[in-house]
Amino acid sequence: MAAKTPHTDLPLFPLGTVLYPGGQLSLRIFERRYLDMISECARTGSSFGVCKILEGHEAGAPALPAAVGTLARIIDFHNREDGLLGILAEGGERFHVMRTRVRSDGLVRGDVELWPAEPTHDVPVELALLPSILERLIENLAPQWRHADRRLYDDAGWVGFRLAELLPLQADEQQRLLEMMDPVQRLAELRDILPRFQRA
């Protein structure tokens, strides 16, 4: 694997969900610390980090973030019907948090190492059912992917990350799949999890 790239003083947004590379995340922003963070990212064109919460809650006192997260780049803003700011963010590179600090406003910032993109692998024959399952999930749950390039369904990494974000997985499973470095291994794990969701 190529050398990891350092990234200092990254604002972190601990959430109750995992953002995967290439995924999309819709957020409503209401706490001052995160409104300021979004303003900073919009002004500078920079990203923020999304990490799964290990301890604590999304609002209120600073939560303890997982050590591996994903860069999030804002791709759209909108005003919600409830008057709050809504954003749509897209997942980029994964990163490992080396150290964190909490600012006086409660915003967690961290020094992180960016992981390189994982190698591209075709979906192996023994896992060929998974892209078909993903296509059915997308039709029902993820309209943003309905017109995705058909070639993406041959990409083990893309299929694995999309399945991981659409299946109702447990929190520790979501994080473990994010931290895996081998896209084929991730698909194999998802194949072993799938029987849990099959109707009797």
Image (spheres, rainbow, N blue to C red):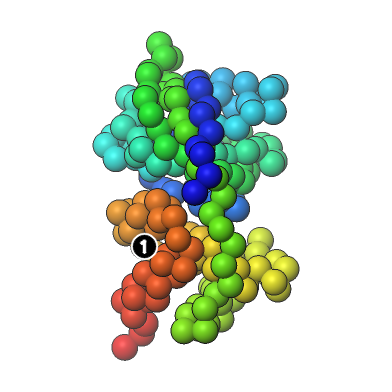
SS at mark 1 in the image: loop
The residue drawn where x is 41% and y is 67% is 185
Q: Nearer the viewer, residue 98 or 54?
A: 98
Residue 151 drawn at (x, y percent):
69, 71
196 sits to left or right of 179: left
Number of numbered discs? 1
The residue drawn where x is 42% and y is 65% is 186
Q: Nearer the viewer, residue 5 or 171?
A: 5
Residue at the top extreme, as displayed: 104
Residue at the front extreme, as displayed: 2
Residue 110 drawn at (x, y percent):
43, 25
Reply above or below: 56 against 194: above
Q: Quadrant of the C terminus?
A: bottom left
Is there any visible trace of residue 185 in the rendered image? yes
Q: Which residue is mark 1?
A: 169
The residue drawn where x is 37% and y is 69% is 189
The residue drawn where x is 35% and y is 55% is 176
Decide: few, some or many residues near mark 1? Use Cα within 10 Å; few <14, some 14-19, many ≥20.
Answer: some
In which quarter of the view is residue 140 placed? bottom right
Residue 12 drawn at (x, y percent):
46, 30
Amino acid beneath label 1: Leu
Residue at the bottom extreme, as displayed: 200
Is there any visible trace of residue 12 in the rendered image? no
Residue 74 drawn at (x, y percent):
65, 38
